[in-house]
Image: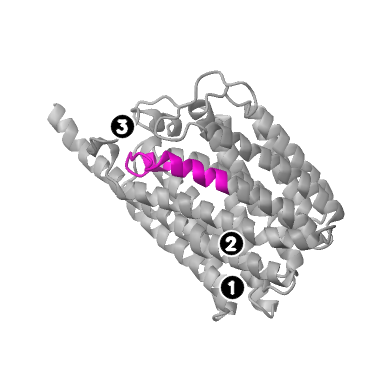
Amino acid sequence: MDNNKAETRTPAVHREVQLQRAVMAYIVTGIVFMLLPGTFLGVWNLISISNRHQLDTLSPAWLQAHGHAQIYGWIGTFIIGIGFYSLSKMGQLPPFAVRRAWTAYGLWAAGVTLRWGANVTGWHWRIALPVSAALELAGFLTFFATVSRHKANPGAPRKPKEPWMLVVIAGTCGFLFALLMNVFTTCQAAWLGVTPAVPHALDQRMLVIPVWVFLVPTVWGFNARWLPVFVGLQGANGKQLLAATGLGWLGVLLALSGYSLVAAVLFLIAAAVATFALRIFHRPVKAAKTTGVHGSFPWFVRFAYLWLGVAGVLTVWAAAADHAGGIWGASRHSVTVGFLGVMVFAIGQRILPAFCGARVLFSKRAMLASLVLLNVGCALRVSSEIPAYEGFLYAQLFWRILPISAVTELTAVSVFAANLLVTFCRPPAHLSVEAPRPAPGVFASVIAR
């Protein structure tokens, strides 16, 4: 009987292994987008701006290529990959899961690459921009159709969706909304524009969509599930977290309608409510699980939420008083690098090795170095961008600091990427006699319903 059971489970186990390989492809591709078209291009842009002491001299298309590669190419690819991994832990794997994962991967990677190439080179951009947006949308819809059809384990009782799942679902809907708006803006730019760049005023409004209805709520949702396990925090207040998500959506709708200051205030309130709901700065109720990672990682999770608060305050300031783009730039950097980047560096190095074949992170010291450098680089960037761009006292000094911040962040990203890539090249923990094997069931428990 046991032999028959093992035989019947073999195809499912084989599909799970194949799906893990696909997920690893997503993570590695996200790292490539983060390192090259994302961070490296961003550093090049910032050095060019610093040398000229003027933002307007740099191509808006290059700036948008950097932002798109960071938001969609890096974090978006990570989220889709993690979503596919969850199939193997949430219930029965659909027979088509592996095929769909690779199909979505091909569409998504091609779309992001084409968008970056069209923005940077201008190659057939009137066709490339809408096609890139359509490919990204098709990749996401393939992912969504797959994860929405997973089957629960036989005999498992049906339970109502927990608040963290509702927040993640809201973030997934926000992902779809952002991609639909991306199709709209790229088609408009291709039809009416004179360069491969979305007009500045429209782009300024569109930037709030992926941040506040997709990326930030998705992080909140997964934090509500993972932080009580990994950091030892008390369980999140579901009603407050849902309220924060609703405030974010309302803020985006108001921003799109032109009420930028009211929207900024709502974003700040949403950030404060979510931080309180997640008990980020409450006393832990149990010890953090730091096996295999640097013991300081719970502190960097808290630093990420400090950056989210800074981003909220700067967004309000920018909506009320920005003149040259410096305050807006600092607010966006605080949320994308300070909050999202630090969170990915902290939690990502905790979970991604386990998701990609139950591996153990290569170097704890490299993890600490990447987190310290990223926070230092972000602090230098945010503190110098406002006085430099806005022409404050000693502006020349701050123009000289900006390239230092860019190189510091590039170093942080390079260390993070190298640490994960070396980890993926090593054998899984259960095949290595040198590395301790992760505690069984920890990662399955935080993914499963």
Which residue is at 42% across, 43% downward?
352
Q: Which residues are magenta?
A: 352-373
Mark 1 Cα within 10 Å, few/some/many (few <14, many 20+)? Answer: many
Q: Are marks 1 and 3 in contact (CB under 8 Å)?
A: no
Rendered image: mark on residue 99: none
Q: Is residue 55 left or right of residue 130?
A: right
| Residue 97 seen in the current view | no
Q: Is residue 400 left or right of residue 430?
A: right
Q: Which residue is mark 2?
A: 68
Q: How is the image coloured?
A: one colour
x and y percent of residue 208 in the render?
A: 69, 53
Name which of mark 1 and mark 3 comes first in the sequence. Answer: 1
Most common SS among magenta residues: helix
Q: Are marks 2 and 3 in contact (CB under 8 Å)?
A: no
Q: CA distance from mark 1 to mark 2?
A: 10 Å
Taking the magenta stretch, the answer to whether it contains residue 20 is no
Rendered image: mark on residue 119: 1
Q: Are marks 1 and 2 in contact (CB under 8 Å)?
A: yes
Mark 3 Cα within 10 Å, few/some/many (few <14, many 20+)? Answer: few
Q: Is residue 380 left or right of residue 70?
A: right
x and y percent of residue 156 in the render?
A: 38, 26
Q: Give the residue type at disc 2.
A: His
Q: Give the residue type at disc 3.
A: Pro
Name which of mark 1 and mark 2 comes first in the sequence. Answer: 2
Taking the magenta stretch, the answer to whether it contains residue 358 is yes
Which residue is at 63% across, 53% downward?
210
Q: Which residue is mark 3?
A: 436
Give the quadrant of residue 388: bottom right
Q: Please name whichever residue, 85 or 29, is drawn nearer the observer in this view of the structure.
A: 29
